[in-house]
């Protein structure tokens, strides 16, 4: 079970701040790192960024293939827009999200199957997108700058 207080103390997370987002295998949520320091700022079930880049460290991927053990080597980099605290820290009965816009496509990365992020439907490589939304262990992207993602609760980390 995840820790109830998921945000680290330290510098506040501000809108427009450059961040790196990676899925945390043990906590089952996304870790948010400061791009400049690479230090974890906090954790969230959902994170949205603009001017996203999809990064895979090939040395980390090769290590996964060699050792057959996962490590953190793939990130979504972007300008922070918003995040939602893990559900347990708000209320276990609240729904996570009410709707994903049809304009969002799913990105996919598995080091055993592909060398970089790809569009899940077409398997075309993805390197950047104007908007990315990480939710429920998945990464979605849009070729428009800010599609509306509708939440049924309003705990936002953007201070």
Image (cartoon, helix red, strand yellow):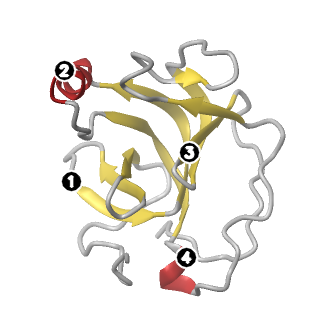
Residue 93, x across and y down, in percent: 66, 86
The N terminus appears in which quarter of the rendering?
Answer: bottom left
Q: Secondary structure at mark 3?
A: strand
Give the CA distance from mark 3 to mark 1. Answer: 22 Å
Mark 3 = which residue?
A: 138
Q: Which label number is shown at residue 87?
A: 4
Up/down of 159 relative to 15, above or below? below
Q: Is residue 11 rendered to the left or right of residue 142?
A: left
Residue 109: which numbered mark, if any? none
The numbered dot on residue 39 is 1
Badges 3 and 4: C-beta atoms under 8 Å apart?
no
Question: Does 121 appear above or below 147?
Answer: above
At a point 80% along the width and 36% down the height, the residue shown is 103
How far apart are the two marked residues, 2 and 3, measured between alpha carbons?
Answer: 23 Å
How far across and down, in percent of the image, does residue 104 sit? Answer: 74, 37
Q: Residue furthest front?
A: 68
- Which residue is label 2 attached to? 59
């Amino acid at each position: 079970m995840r820790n109830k207080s998921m945000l680290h103390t330290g510098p506040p997370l501000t809108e427009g701040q450059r961040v790196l987002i990676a899925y945390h295998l043990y906590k089952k949520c996304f870790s948010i790192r400061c791009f400049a320091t690479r230090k974890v700022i906090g954790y969230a079930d959902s994170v949205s960024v603009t001017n996203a880049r999809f990064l895979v460290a090939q040395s980390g991927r090769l290590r996964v293939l060699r050792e057959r053990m996962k490590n953190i080597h793939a990130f979504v980099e972007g300008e922070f827009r918003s995040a939602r605290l893990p559900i347990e820290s708000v209320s276990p009965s609240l729904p996570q999200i009410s709707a994903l816009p049809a304009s969002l496509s799913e990105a996919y990365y598995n080091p055993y199957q592909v060398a970089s992020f790809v569009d899940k439907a077409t398997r075309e490589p993805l390197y950047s997108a104007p908007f990315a939304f990480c939710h429920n262990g998945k990464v979605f992207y849009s070729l428009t700058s800010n599609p509306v993602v509708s939440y049924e609760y309003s705990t936002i980390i953007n201070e």
